[in-house]
Image: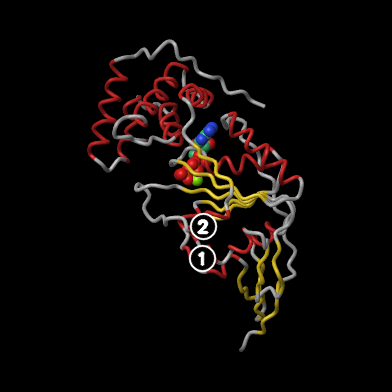
Amino acid sequence: MPHKKRPASGLKRDSIPIPPGEPDFWIAQENLERLNRIATRSEKGEQVNVLISGSKGCGKTTMAREFAARFQRPFHEVHCGAFIDNEQWFGKDRLDDGVTWYRKSRFVQAIETPGAVVLLDEINRAHPEILSAILGLLDWRHSIWNDDLGYEIRVAGGVVFFATINEGDDYYGVNVMDAALRDRFSRTIMLDYMPCKAEAGILHKHGLAEDMALKLAVYANTMRKSVNPVPISTRQLLVTTEEMLDGATLRKAAETSIINALSDMTSKKMALEALQWLEDNPYVDENIEIIPVKSE
Ligand SMILES: Nc1ncnc2c1ncn2[C@@H]1O[C@H](COP(=O)(O)OP(=O)(O)OP(=O)(O)O)[C@@H](O)[C@H]1O
Ligand SMILES: [Mg+2]
């Protein structure tokens, strides 16, 4: 039986939710100021496009979500690497009682919500052709005609687009970000791992004793800054913390969360040697004071 095709589904949908905040999330003062300026601009009804660039696990995705939480904005996240065709941005056909409905995507619903924060996560994992389908939404046009919906999709006032990007040789499956696309993200925030003291504070807040939290943060910092840097992420340190809270020794915890995942033998050897050094020197620099995490 041929399916009758109807235009946009009138199905009622939940509104885009405001995410809960992460009180432990540490943001450098200069970035806090940047986020405040972005929020002010968006409050005036302007669309703002922000690129967040940085190493793995340094808080890029969480920062976009945290922005939405702090400024009480509806938040929608798109995993760009999961897109296989252009049409996915806008909606898809759904079969209901023998009738095919075109259902508008959550992405379109989000960009039509005034003041929403839309995260295009890991934007350089999407094929450039897929991203070119939304270029019109990201520039002065703020809109795109869509045949299936039968109308021009317009970005609502004050929408903030964040895009995150991992750049460098270490990232398999990423594309170099197209110049036309990059140009549309007129603001860039370069994120780095937190300073040692702040990171120790986070690990302590997650339950690790102060001295151990500091040791682990010093370890990660040393490895990140070595001649052949080993980018140990905050995420990995949080797993090390979990492992230790579950009874593992520092060595076993670090093996499970960091060292066993290293494929390069030189990095592995360095990480093990630094760990050995940490075990042999139980006292870390007493001049480093950890920053306690303030709960709001
Ligand atoms: N500044 C920070 N303050 C507190 N926690 C942090 C911070 N940065 C990262 N984390 C923690 O590390 C984990 C990873 O963060 P997130 O996923 O945001 O990083 P990412 O940069 O997006 O990683 P990826 O490159 O893998 O996508 C999260 O649990 C997050 O809470
Ligand atoms: Mg991320």
* Residue indicated by mark 1: 130
Query: Sequence-wise, which precedes: disc 2 or disc 1?
Result: 2
Residue 132 position (above or below residue 276): below
In the shown orientation, is residue 190 left or right of residue 107? left
Quarter of the view holding residue 87: bottom right
Question: Residue 184, image x and y in percent?
Answer: 58, 55
Question: What x and y, as percent, mark residue 9?
Answer: 71, 71
Left/right of residue 229 with respect to residue 32 in the rendered view: left
**Residue type (three-letter) at the residue carrying disc 2:** Cys
Seen at 62% across and 37% down, the residue is 34
Mark 1 burial class by Cα count in 10 Å: few <14, some 14-19, many 20+: some
Where is residue 53? Give x, y as percent.
49, 44
Name the disc covering residue 80, or none.
2
At a point 36% along the width and 29% down the height, the residue shown is 225
Front tag of 2 and 1: 1
Q: Residue furthest top?
A: 286
Q: Quadrant of residue 293?
A: top right
Quadrant occupied by the C terminus: top right
Front-lying residue, 283 or 40: 40
For the residue carrying disc 2, how many other residues have a C-alpha within 10 Å: few (<14), some (14-19), or many (20+)?
many
Q: Secondary structure at mark 1?
A: helix
Taking the view exactly as shown, the residue that stands out farthest to the bottom is 1
Please determine whether, in this image, residue 289 is positioned above or below residue 223.
above
Q: Is mark 2 within 8 Å of ligand 2?
A: no
User: From what the image shows, is residue 127 above or below residue 261?
Assistant: below
Are dots 2 and 1 in contact, CB under 8 Å?
Answer: yes
